[in-house]
Image (cartoon, rainbow, N blue to C red):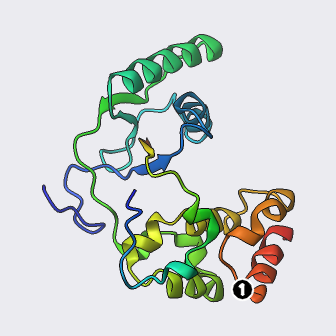
Amino acid sequence: MNAPTYRKMGDHTETVQLDYDPQRITYAQLLDIFWKSHMPTRRSWSRQYMSAVFYHNEEQRQQALASKATLEQNIGHAVKTNVVPVRSFTMAEDYHQKYILKKHRALSNQMARIYPNPQDFVDSPAVTRLNGYAGGHATADQLSREIDILGLSAEGKNRVADLVKR
Amino acid sequence: MNLAYTLETKPAEIPPIDVAAPAVFETASFGLG
């Protein structure tokens, strides 16, 4: 299937694809987070909800297989998560993108005014970080270090600060 | 990542963290079950 949708996914798998700065975080660190973010010893329920590392090159393949082997050794159990090559990737519909941030309309709308093009909105590091803050994935201390470079108005800064305090 | 923002975005409005973002990222993909 060439153009999967949420309602008609065919043989595609729901996947998180992220662009990262290797100067700030390594692929090995991302793998560590990945192993902690799902249940690697459980067989996947379906193709749609498959646990997998989709590697983009030989280096990623080798690192993924090595970290999988290390995990198996550490936990003494077979890891069922697949390590397979990425073939194609289709962005989910706009309403799935930056989903948590969009629940906070004032903040989301502020960034949408900066980035009226949905693809620019999705690609923005500022929007991505606000989505993380809205999801409770960072501390107030982390926010205080970068709140002035996120492109927010004074009201926007207060709103995101309130979210992080919760 | 596409840093060639569209003309709809005024350069003065782009958040500093986005302006400072590197031009080249690496990509990783994961299925979380």
Residue under the image location 58 percent in, 59 percent down: B20
| Residue situated in front as seen by the camera: A77 or A55 | A55
Residue under the image location 52 percent in, 88 percent down: A113
Q: In this view, does A89 lie above or below A119?
A: above
For mark 1, name the chain.
A
In the rendered image, the quadrant that contains the C terminus of chain A is bottom right
Corner quadrant of residue A54: top left
In this picture, residue A76 sits left or right of residue A133: left
The residue under label 1 is which amino acid type? Ser
In the rendered image, the quadrant that contains the N terminus of chain A is bottom left
Q: Position of residue A69 (x, y in %)?
A: 50, 14
In this picture, residue B13 sits left or right of residue A159: left
Q: In this view, does A5 lie above or below A46?
A: below
SS under mark 1: loop
Task: Confirm whether residue A17 shows in the render.
Answer: yes
| Residue situated in front as seen by the camera: A110 or A65 | A110
Residue under the image location 60 percent in, 32 percent down: A29
Q: In this view, does A67 lie above or below A15?
A: above
Q: Where is residue A66 in the image (x, y as percent from the top left)?
A: 48, 15
| Residue situated in front as seen by the camera: B11 or A79 | B11
Neighbours of disc 1 within 10 Å: few (<14), some (14-19), many (20+)? few
In this picture, residue A49 sits left or right of residue A161: left
Q: Position of residue A11 (x, y in %)?
A: 21, 49
Residue under the image location 63 percent in, 17 percent down: A75
The extreme front residue here reads B12
Q: Where is residue A18 in the image (x, y as percent from the top left)?
A: 46, 50
Task: Confirm whether residue A78 shows in the render.
Answer: no
In this picture, residue A52 sits left or right of residue A104: left
**Residue for badge 1:** A153
